[in-house]
Image (cartoon, rainbow, N blue to C red):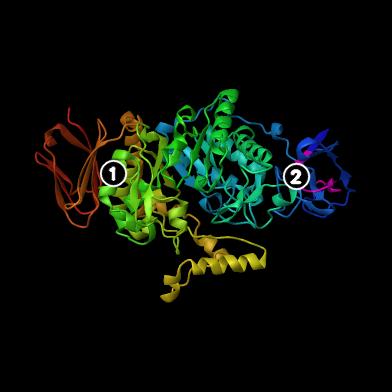
Amino acid sequence: MTRFRVWAPTPDHVALVVAADPGIGGSPATGDPIPMAREAGGWWTADLDVPAGTSYGYRLDGDGPFPDPRSPWQPDGVHGLSRTVDHAAFPWTDAAFRPTPLPSAILYELHVGTFTPGGTFASAIDRLDQLVELGITHVELMPVVEFPGDRGWGYDGVDLFAPHHAYGGPEGLKRLVDACHARGLAVLVDVVWNHLGPDGNYLGRFGPYFTDRYKTPWGDAVNFDGPGSDDVRAFVIDNARMWLRDYHADGLRIDAVHAIFDQSAVPILEAVAAAVHELATELGRPLVAIAESDLNDPRLVRDPALGGDGLDAQWNDDYRHALHVALTGESDGYHAQYRGLPDVAAALRRVFVFEGRYSAFRGRSHGRPVGDLPSTRFVGFLQNHDQVGNRALGERIGHLVGPDALKVGAALVLLGPFVPLLFAGEEWAAGSPFQYFTDHRDEALAAAVREGRRREFPAFQRAGIEVPDPQAEATFVRSRLDWTERAREPHASVLAWYRALIGIRRRHPGLHDGRRPAVRVDEREGWLVADHGELRVVARPAPTPCAVPMADADDWRMLLASSSEIILDGAGLRMPAWSAAVLEPAR
């Protein structure tokens, strides 16, 4: 017997409908509507003897059927019927797996649809061995929930419990996670709880999932603190538990928490962190929750007993922005407030560049000092999907600078004090861009998205440069990784550099202990030296050679150099343009 249960306090009548043929999900349900019993708190239930894989939906006051807000599977997309799933039926083989602890992790963010030509969970399995060979410990999946159409970034998802049909659905995701665990790779799932996409979003018909008291850049804010919010909060907490329990994920990356608005005494992020850690105890394996945040607020990762939310880590955009300016010299938009190399040094010393400093871009002071928090509570990166895909043409850092400059940035990330994250293809300076793409079937919405993307980049229009059409399949196809590049130059040399850096990181526990390095920087000459105990990283992100003085030069020897022209002598290092060196004690 299957119990169908749905929270729907808004309608006066709720009925369950089941497809006459369970194998025809999304077709009009031909069975008679089954009235559901109203329970306390706006819940409705019905018990029915149906097999796993049954297609169903809910009629609300005679309208519909609509997908289940907690639908586990949408085989026919966001407007189709839901389908039941027996999570206990999957033959997991990962009972002995334990992830690398987060302080020692190397994260790898990927988009399932562009990671391989096949663009599915199954085809992603074929590339996992290359990630293991590279030294990756955690695969971070961009959102995999059901979203409109067959292709998209996933941040406009609407069925938050259902893995996307075009990627392979629930079974495909489980096979991918199991395959990752078999290779020693942990899996993080990117979740979006600050908004839902507009197309196929039926939650508002069921109950007060959204509020107009707050605004997000992407649509209605989720109701975490208003009337009816208890069950909305439960919806999100149960969503977190589902990815970790039913899909065996090892953690969550929570999207844009600065757009999650909640004035509750116990904020939803604190409640999620507590639920994740309680589940870890119950399951007997470590689980983590990582926030993406624009707030520069360390309270996200402080212990609740000290006034924090208790999350395990948060992204550090400041480090990326300072590195980007140092390598590219770009000064547009938010980049204008960063000073390049001096701010790279500031982030290495104190985590945030803006820790209460005035931000000209924001027109106010921004951020808060991190105090004694270990640096391994923060994720550092040279690029991610946002900083690549939100550019008009989707250029990666490897399109903006040459291989030598890219190697300098990679050394400062992979041998830095933060938990490093790579964006798929970065390790070989992938030639494919990562552009913004969608597949909206609603013509009005598609036109609005297309026009909105053009308006976002007026300078391109003035220059007569065409911004890629997000709805065009070609935009998606251009964004696929070409794995054959790895064997060709300059990609092969970049890949070898990344492998060498990751190997050094994994052999030097001083990079995992949360301590921040001692940093020397010369802004005028353009060099930076970071001492991590038994490791010294020297960076020259500038277009001319220079000498880096080292009073203790005789105490060090070369471990890795990005150029054969780097010379270590008794006075220090002679560095060519765009170069990096890694030194270890001379014993």
Q: Where is 174 relative to 19, above or below?
A: above
Q: CA distance from mark 1 to mark 2?
A: 52 Å
Q: Return the mark for residue 346.
A: 1
Q: Where is 457 relative to 313, above or below?
A: below
Q: Nearer the viewer, mark 1 or mark 2?
A: 1
Which percent across, then down, holds residue 544?
A: 18, 56
Which percent across, then down, holds residue 246?
A: 64, 34
User: Pointer 1 and pointer 2: residues touching (CB < 8 Å)?
Assistant: no
Left or right side of 133 for 143: right
Q: Is residue 22 magenta?
A: yes
Residue at coordinates 25% horizontally, 52% vertically from top-left?
A: 541
Please rate how many residues cluster around mark 2, counting C-alpha atoms within 10 Å: few if below 14, some from 14 to 19, many from 20. Answer: many
Which percent across, then down, holds residue 204?
A: 70, 51
Counting residues from the start of the chain, the first of labels 1 and 2 encountered is 2
Left or right side of 65 for 134: left
Q: Residue furthest right?
A: 32
Q: Secondary structure at mark 2?
A: strand
Q: Which residues are magenta?
A: 5-23
| Of 352 and 136, the residue lying toward us | 352
Which percent across, then down, holds residue 514?
A: 35, 31
Quarter holding residue 552: top left
Amino acid tagged 2: Arg
